[in-house]
Image (cartoon, rainbow, N blue to C red):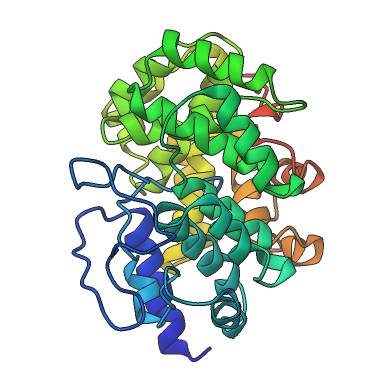
């Protein structure tokens, strides 16, 4: 991909996950949503509700500018082979990011059967990215648990069902504005009916999207949830803070004082993850500055959580490749900090909030 296309993609990705106010102007290739046989209808009000795992803030269902700049095919009128060809054209790390973003857009405008048809056509090595994205755009028409589970289990390949179960819980959490009693009751019942499935990933993203624009309110709301939900919720809300690139607000707004002591360090882990991922997306990686920011604004007792959050971000952007991960941490000279960062690769595939982020001696 030529450099100007890479720059366009990074700018578009930044807009998709962060800048909510960027206008969307349809261009040839990807059109604004029109009625199609297999398209999913908008809400009755005509305004699509806000559409993560790759943590996104949620955007309406219009085509992301980055996809439009790349000439992405309209998923409602293009064949699966045409869409697969588009994905194959994207090279390097941008392919994973683009596939996730395209999947999220498809999740808004297409029904489940069509999503699966397209997902199984894209290259195998990015099918996870497509289905993960699609599930982040997926919004069920209702919340009858048995019917939803049966539909997902029958339509979606086994490897990708968990994403859509997350999508159900995320969507429900947004719908009820994160009401702890309603969410916990619904999510716990739902998870109990799906073998080997836990409710935390879907709920954490739903709460972040419902309240993330007012992070103080979001933190207070998260503290109302049962203890077993809190690590996931606070890690995700930490991501939202870090994603804003203004770590000074941790002390300026007294955010850390709103986090229960038991979740302080998993919150710090999320802050570091979000900060590093957003900096990466901007193409402005300066590891010395990142190290300075984390050291200055994260409490020393949560240093392990912060450096593991950095490692988690690098693990994601290294596409889970151990060699690339190690190369990208070669700047780290502090053996203890690097060991903490490397724990993220050792635990690859384990939910971030389940990692041990124990406090360090003061």
Quadrant of the image for the C terminus? top right
- Check the image and report above or below for 318 versus 173: below
Q: Nearer the viewer, residue 338 or 115?
A: 115
Q: Nearer the viewer, residue 262 or 224?
A: 224
Which image quadrant is residue 229 in?
top right
Q: Nearer the viewer, residue 99 or 248?
A: 99
- Check the image and report above or below for 193 versus 300: above
Which image quadrant is residue 131 in?
bottom right
**Residue 362 shows in this picture:** yes
Residue 308: image x %, image y %? 65, 40
- Check the image and report above or below for 361 versus 174: above
52 relative position to 212: left or right: right
Q: Residue at x 37, y 15 (%)?
A: 179
Q: Residue at x 43, y 48 (%)?
A: 56
Q: Nearer the viewer, residue 333 or 76?
A: 76
Residue 135: image x %, image y %? 53, 47
For the view shown, which residue lies furthest in the bottom direction? 2
**Residue 265 shows in this picture:** no
Which image quadrant is residue 355 in?
top right
Total of numbered circles in the picture?
0
Q: Residue at x 29, y 42 (%)?
A: 49
Residue 121: image x %, image y %? 66, 70
Q: Residue at x 62, y 31 (%)?
A: 149
Residue 164: image x %, image y %? 58, 41
- Check the image and report above or below for 97 versus 71: above
318 relative position to 11: left or right: right
């Amino acid at each position: 991909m030529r450099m100007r296309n890479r720059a366009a993609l990074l700018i578009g990705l930044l807009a998709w996950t962060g800048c909510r106010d960027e206008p969307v102007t349809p261009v040839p290739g990807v059109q604004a949503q029109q009625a199609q046989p297999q398209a999913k209808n908008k809400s009755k009000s005509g305004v699509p509700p806000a559409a993560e795992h790759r943590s996104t803030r949620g955007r309406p269902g219009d085509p992301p500018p980055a996809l439009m700049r790349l000439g992405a095919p309209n998923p409602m009128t293009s064949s699966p082979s045409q869409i697969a060809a588009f994905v194959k054209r994207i090279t390097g790390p941008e392919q994973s990011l683009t596939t996730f973003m395209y999947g999220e857009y498809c999740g808004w405008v297409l029904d489940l059967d069509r999503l699966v048809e397209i997902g199984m056509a894209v290259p195998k090595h990015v099918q996870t990215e497509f289905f993960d994205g699609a599930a982040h755009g997926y919004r069920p028409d209702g919340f009858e648990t048995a019917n939803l589970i049966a539909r997902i289990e029958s339509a979606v390949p086994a490897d990708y069902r968990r994403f859509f179960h997350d999508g159900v819980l995320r969507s429900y959490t947004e719908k009820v504005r994160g009401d702890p009693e309603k969410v916990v009751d619904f999510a716990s019942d739902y998870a109990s009916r799906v073998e080997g499935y836990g409710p935390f990933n879907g709920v954490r993203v739903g709460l972040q999207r419902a309240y993330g624009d007012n992070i103080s309110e979001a933190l207070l709301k998260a503290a109302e949830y049962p203890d077993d939900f809190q690590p996931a919720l606070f890690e995700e809300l930490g991501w939202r803070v870090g994603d804003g690139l203004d770590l000074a607000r941790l002390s300026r707004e007294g955010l850390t004082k709103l986090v229960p002591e038991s979740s302080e360090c998993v919150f710090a882990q999320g802050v570091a993850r979000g900060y590093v991922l957003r900096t990466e997306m901007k193409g402005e990686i300066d590891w010395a500055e990142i190290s300075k920011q984390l050291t200055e604004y994260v409490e020393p007792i949560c240093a392990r959580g912060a450096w593991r959050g950095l490692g988690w971000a690098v693990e994601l952007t290294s596409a889970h490749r151990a060699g690339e991960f190690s190369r990208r941490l070669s700047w780290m000279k502090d053996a203890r900090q690097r060991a903490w960062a490397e724990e993220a690769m050792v635990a690859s595939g384990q939910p971030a909030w389940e990692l041990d982020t124990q406090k360090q001696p003061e």
